[in-house]
Amino acid sequence: MRKPYYESILLIERLHRHFLEVLKTELDRLGIQDINNVQSLILYNIGEDEMTVGELTARGYYLGSNVSYNVKKMVENGYLGQERSPHDRRSVRVRLSEKGLDLREKISLMFERHLTALEKAGFSDEELTKANETLRKLERFWSASLDYSGFPMTSAA
């Protein structure tokens, strides 16, 4: 395997773990103990929307069983409200409670601090946009590889 590709794989995974640690540190700084970093990221991504766990899984690319567990914990701790769908009693819709909206605002403020710090550190919007474009291309490549039609396969014979 060529080194740049493998380094990209490792770096993406490491960056995700680092970001989750940054989020955990922010929760600790705020004295918030009843929600973890992954749950707070799910909460942030729900935003002002109301959606089912299935929709959350599809939009956030989270693993389904983990989302169900995390949603349950966020409901128990007062960050989410839930309501059965009147059209499909098996489906439950979730939305942020006042407590959830308050935490989402705090996370938004953290992101704003990060943006200011990134600018001071010399990161430009153009650099981040270019990095995002590269990551999206890699995402499309991996998505296409799942159905084996996105790139030519070589024959072993």
Image (spheres, helix red, strand yellow):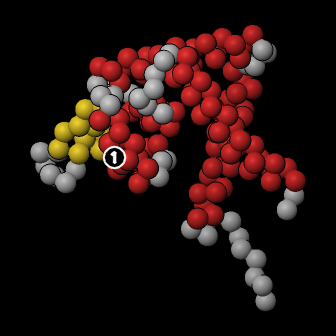
Is 81 in front, or is 76? 76
Q: Residue 25's image quarter?
A: top right
Give the x, y percent position of residue 57.
Answer: 41, 48
Question: In what element is the residue under mark 1?
Answer: helix
Q: Residue at x 42, y 20 (%)?
A: 103
At label 1, the amino acid type is Val
Q: Which residue is mark 1?
A: 53
Does residue 137 appear left or right of residue 61 in this picture?
A: right
Q: Residue 95's image quarter?
A: top left
Q: Residue at x 33, y 46 (%)?
A: 53
Q: Quadrant of the C terminus?
A: bottom right
Q: Residue at x 29, y 35 (%)?
A: 76
- In the current view of this chain or complex, which residue is farthest to the right? 3
Give the x, y percent position of residue 121.
Answer: 78, 14
Q: Is residue 11 above or below residue 37?
A: below
Q: Residue at x 85, y 49 (%)?
A: 4
Q: Residue 97's image quarter?
A: top left
Give the x, y percent position of residue 12.
Answer: 70, 43
